[in-house]
Structure formats: C-alpha cells, structure tokens
Image (spheres, rainbow, N blue to C red):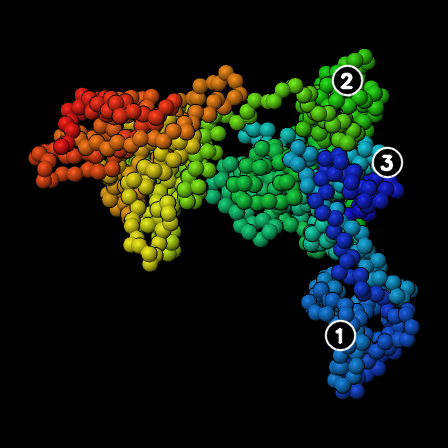
Amino acid sequence: MKFTLSWLKDHLDTDASLDEIVEKLTMIGLEVEEVIDRSAPLKPFKTVKVLEATQHPNADRLRVLKVDTGEGEPLQVVCGAPNARAGMVGVLGKPGDYVPGLDVTLSVGKIRDVESFGMMCSERELELSDAHEGIIDLPADTPVGIPFATIAGLDDPVIEIGLTPNRPDCTGVYGIARDLAAAGLGKLKERSREQIKGAFPCPVSVTLDNDGTEFCPAFGLRLVKGVKNGPSPKWMQDRLMAIGLRPINTLVDITNYLTFDQGRPLHVFDAAKVAGNLTVRRAAAGESLEGLNGKTYTLDESVFVIADNNGPESLAGIMGGEHSGSTEETVDVLIESALWNPDMIAATGRKLGINTDARYRFERGVDPDYMLPGLEAATRLVLDLCGGEASEVLVAGEVPEITKTIDFPYGEVKRLSGIEVSVAEINVILKSLGFWISGSGDTVKVAAPSWRPDIHGKADLVEEVVRILGLDRVIPTPLPRTGSVGQKVLTTGQIRRSRARRALASRGLNEAITWSFISEAQAQHFGGGVPELKLANPISADMSDMRPTLLAGLLMAAQRNADRGNGDVALFEVGQIFENDTPEGQKMVASGVRRGTAKLAGGGRHWSAATAAVDVFDAKADAAAALAAIGAPVDKLQVFAEAPSYFHPGRSGSLRLGPKNTLAVFGEIHPRTLAELDIDGPIVGFEIFLDALPEPKGKGGRSKGALNVSDLMPVRRDFAFVVAKDVSAETLLKAARGAEKQLITDVTLFDIYEGKGVPEGHKSLAIDVTLQPVKKTFTDEEIDAVAKKVIAAVEKATGATLRA
C-alpha cells in the first residue's frame, strides 16, 4: 500500500514530521517497508529564465540561449527545442548533473562550434512524462534558481507499508489516518457523508441472480448524464503517478483514486454502451470477456459477471470490460458500488490469474457500511470535475448489518500483555478506533466497527489496545531461575540425527538433501509404490510417489555428479522414508553412497599406489561408524549376509542387534538396480535405521563413571581353526569373544585359507585374540587356561578343530 505524505495529511491534521509518522506506523503494526524520495534524482535541476534566444550561426534548428540561473553571470546553452524563446522560464541541467531520461551525465561541450554549459530539459528527459516536443515551459512568475522538484510537487515523499491480510481497513489512506489519530499523532478529519439528491430515477435496473450463494448481497448504481470526460486534474494525476498508477481519464482516475483514498473500489460504465438492464449472474460456459487490460478471458459457471442484454460487461468485483469502458467520448456514465463475497472473488482471481487493486480489497473484505457513502463520494467527484446531472441511487439487495458484540473483561489487557492500563485509557483507544462500548464494571460489551472484519474475540481487543499503546510498553521480564541446570532440550531422535551427520561428514561424505518423492517405477524397484503413498498433485511424473528409501535420490545425485566430471563422490543424507501412510510407517534413516574410488582415505588416481574402487567393506565401515556415534553397542552387533534386493546378494549384509532388530544394511548396489536407474557403477551404499535403536537407559546421576584403564601390557595369541566351508567367520568370532569376557578385549580375523593342508570342503580361519590383564601380569598357566577356553568354545559353537 503506497501513499504520499500530503495525501495522508488530507485526512490527518498533524504537525508530526515524516520520521515520526514512519516510526509510529511501524509501532502500530503498519510496517513501513520503504520511504521513496522522488525528488532525489531531480535535486540538481533548478529553474532558470531565458534572457536571450538567438539563432545558432551554424545550424538552422538550434538556438543559443542566455539563461539567468539566479547565481551570478548568465550561462550560455545551446538548445534545439522549438518552444525555446526569450522570456520563458524552464529547467536547466548543469555540467556534472545526471539526466535520468537520457542516462547521461552532462559536461561542457561544443555543439556546431558553439560552447554549451548545460541543457534545457523536457519532461521525458526528467522522466516526468512522455512529452518531448519541447522543453519544460513554466509560468512566467515562477521564481528563478529554486529546485524544480519543489515546483513540480515531487518533494512529497511516498510511503509504502506492508499490509497483513487481516487489515482491510488500511487498504485506504483514510483508514491509515484513522489508526495514526488513535495513536495520538494528530486528529482525524471526518469524511463527508453528504448525500446528493437525484434529479431523476436511474433508468437502468439491476437484478441479483446469486444462484443460491451470497456472492453479491447488495449493488448500488447511479447514472450521471451530460458529463465531459478528459484528463483528470493535475493534483489527482500526480497522486496516482506517485503510487505507480497511470492516469487514463477523469472518470477512470476517480475510481482509482477512491480505491486508494477510501479503500472502496468502484466501476464506471459508459451508459451508451450498456444494452438494457444489468444482471449479476454466473457466466455461461463458453462466454468470454475482453478486460480493460486488453486480455480476453474464457469464462465458465464458476465465475460471476455483471452482464447486460449483450452478455458479460465486467468480471464482478475484479475487472471491467473493454467494451463498456469510459473514454473521452463518454457523455453518460453509470457508477457502480457493490459488495462481493471475498472467498469467491479470491477463487475467481486465482482461476483466471488476475490481480487487480479491486480484487486485492474485495477478497480481504471492504467496509459494507461505506458502500453507499462511497457511491456518493464518487458522484461528488464526477460532478465537480466532469459536470453533469445525477440520478437517484438504485440499490439492489440489502446491505448486511454486521454486528459482532464481544464480552470484554478489562483485566484481559493485564493478563495477556502484562501492561497496566487504566479503564479510561482502554476506552479512549477503542473508541478512537471506532469500537462501540456499552456497560460498566469490570466487564463491558464491545462491538467492532463495520470496517474491522478481523475482530472476533477479546484477545483481538487486547491486541488493538497494546498496538496503539506501543509494544515498547511491554516490560521485558526474564523467566524465573529454577535453581539447577536444566535438562536436555533435544529429543533422543534429534541427538541421534545430529551425531550421525557429524560422524558421516567426518568420514569424508558430503551431505545432500534430495526430494522426498520419486517415480513410481523407482519406488516399486526399492520396495515401495503402494497406492496410499502416491501424491494427489505431483510436481512431475518423475516425482509421483513418496520415497521408500533414501538411496534412490542419493544414487541419482551421484550419477549427476559423474555426468559433470565428478565421478569419485561420497554423499549422505539424513531424512525420512515412508513404508505406508501411518505414523509408524514414517521412519528416520541415515543413508550414504560412495562411488568410484571415493574411499575414506580419499579418491582419484595417485602416483604412489594403484587406485582401488569402493567395496562392501567401505559401506560397512561407514555404517558401523555412524552406529557407534549414535550410541549403538557395535561390539555386540551381529553381521548377517542378508540385505534388500537392491543390494548385490553376495556383497551385502546387515547389522543386527539380536536376530530380528536390523539397525543397518550395507553393500554393493545390485547391477540390475544400476541399470534400472541408468547409473554407472561401482557404487556401494548403506542405510541406518535410527528409530530401530532402543532408547538409552536413564542414568541415576550425572557422573560419567570411573575410568577403567589398565597400565599392564596386553597379551596377544593367534589361533587357526579348520571349519566347514558353510560356517561363517562371525559365528567363530562370537564364540571366541564369549570364552572369557572379563579378560578377552578383542578378537579379529586376520586370515582365511583354503587349499593344500586343509581338507576338501573346509577352510582355515585364523584369529588374533587380545587378553588384557587387570590387576597383575598373566602367568603362562593363566594364559594357557584362557587359550583352552577359547578352543573349547569355538569347537562347541562351530565344530572346528585346531589346525596343526
């Protein structure tokens, strides 16, 4: 919403400065977004008087002028304007001044061998209008040497405020002035409610065919005949141009002016172009209308129009039609002022893609009580500026009486805002804003004015009081101290997500954020694609289903990097996947992929060693590191050679806490999956199910526990077992670890052998067992005892024999 300072002062009697007005507007909730000084580009240009105008010696169309600048000796200026003459008062730009219309900076120059110390300016050169037939010709009594911006009225600053949708009362300058007056920044000038007596009945009738809706509760119409249309007065044109509107003619400019002045959109029809009477109705399928913007709109039954016997003449409440628009030839004019349903206006505007000043106001809700006074105001302006004779006002329908009475306890102001405000001060504020108060005591009845459709309850009334008083009256009050350190504010899930991100990033993976939806084919390939997870209105066919895995998006992102020359890429993402449309089917997952040679130590070729491609163990290490970071007991996890079908069946696995609780899956991506997505390998990936890890057990205190570190040297022993080929190494390692839990701190597999010396159908697994003494160094007997336990445990679990 834009307006000039002088326009505001038409309605507000105030001595406040611009800075005070701007500050107060923001304080009362009408945030000022910008103050535009239109005079800034024109400050260098001043008025001058032409003392002499002689013919240029070397050019027939040029004259040499002597101009009085009011500052010493006259200047010589070469000018080619046909209206340049001695005695006229014009506008001069001196060397060094920037001319906005020409985008040039003036300098002293020679024009046909005659020096010129400036330029006499036209309106187009100063971007005031398109006129460039001659230079600016000011009245003869204009003082010399004063800024031209002052003469042109361009020193009137333009204020732009950002209106929230709940303040339709401030879509007019009058409403803004009313708020400032209530805030104590001046006195509101009452607007005229004088009614113009009609000389004859309105010859055009109006029928409201609302078709079962409340689209148009009331419609006011009046004919003014014998008008003389033409350019509007300069003061009106200046104000419209200041807020970015182009003056058209007096009749149209009057409606635009009242739209911004009073927040009351109106429309004028050329009465000679209206066939018969008017009807507000639904458009018929296939009807069309050429709007005032020159575009043709195809209509249907969802759109309401104002129509005559020939068809639609206007999009009701949004835009008039070109056919019945007013021109300079208009003699008789119909002025319309109506009420429209806000929701249906908004729906029509969105459907047709039309944004107008009328739609902006009607969809927020205009003041119903000002429908007829607005028609009277428009009639007065038409009669004053265009002449003519007005008919009586014809009203179809009935202006609704909107009465919202609220029981308002005065104590609510203190309870909700913390501000101590006297009852008298509250009453003054509410009454100055137009509220009606009845009753006495601690609770009164308050009725909202017709121009405030956003007021619904007592909290809204408190808000009105506080914003007018000023939010600076609210005393900052710290929260009370609890006397102890507060508990953690992050949930377990938030902590796990953060730790997983940190752990994966520290391993050289870059975080990515991919779409939450993928194509139906991709969803089905990754185990999803169920009907309940299809989008009702997808962005595109490739984004039709909610994702059942993060790997699909990461794999596509890795390929896009490869297509751009970055083949060795490692990416991860922490986000949600969707198994079904229930809350339990929405799970939090951390996933990652590595492509090419993007290993932990770095990717790409190097002279010092051959480049190895990523493998399943890289993915397993990433998953294990992230699980350790979020608090999973990694040493107790079991590895199973089972993974979803989109992993390679022989190069993948899962990490489980027990036989059923899968915490992560990892492996090389299946070649069939890569082919389905048109992706080049090799690529490995993993998925960590953050929600599958049980909640940590609560601690009794805040201590971290005793540090249990031995200063004695550990002892390592190697064992080689011969087992059947189908026995997994994990089974053997688990048995060895459990042989003596108090002393065995680590068991690792360091060799697998099949061949000479090992029976057919068997293999040799060599393990390294680390023993950690606690109180004293081990004796040989104690070491042998632990070794026997390890051998016995492995033989019992796997049927292994100790290799000779």
- Of mark 1 and mark 3, the one earlier in the sequence is 1
In this figure, which residue is indicated by the disc labeled 1? 107
Q: Nearer the viewer, residue 503 or 722?
A: 722
Q: Nearer the viewer, mark 2 or mark 3?
A: 2
In this figure, which residue is indicated by the disc labeled 2? 410
Q: Nearer the viewer, residue 510 or 631?
A: 631
Examine the image and state in which quarter residue 358 appears.
top right
Q: Is residue 149 above or below residue 262?
A: below
Instruction: Please name the residue shown 38% across and 49% down the image.
Output: 602
Residue 175 in percent (x, y) is at 76, 36
Residue 399 in percent (x, y) is at 69, 28
Examine the image and state in which quarter residue 487 appears.
top right
In this figure, which residue is indicated by the disc labeled 3? 187
Q: Is residue 655 left or right of residue 461?
A: left
Residue 195 in percent (x, y) is at 81, 36
Q: Nearer the viewer, residue 459 or 8?
A: 459
Q: CA distance from mark 2 to mark 3?
A: 26 Å
Q: CA distance from mark 2 to mark 1?
A: 69 Å
Q: Amino acid at mark 3?
A: Lys
- Of mark 2 and mark 3, the one earlier in the sequence is 3
Q: Are marks 2 and 1 in contact (CB under 8 Å)?
A: no
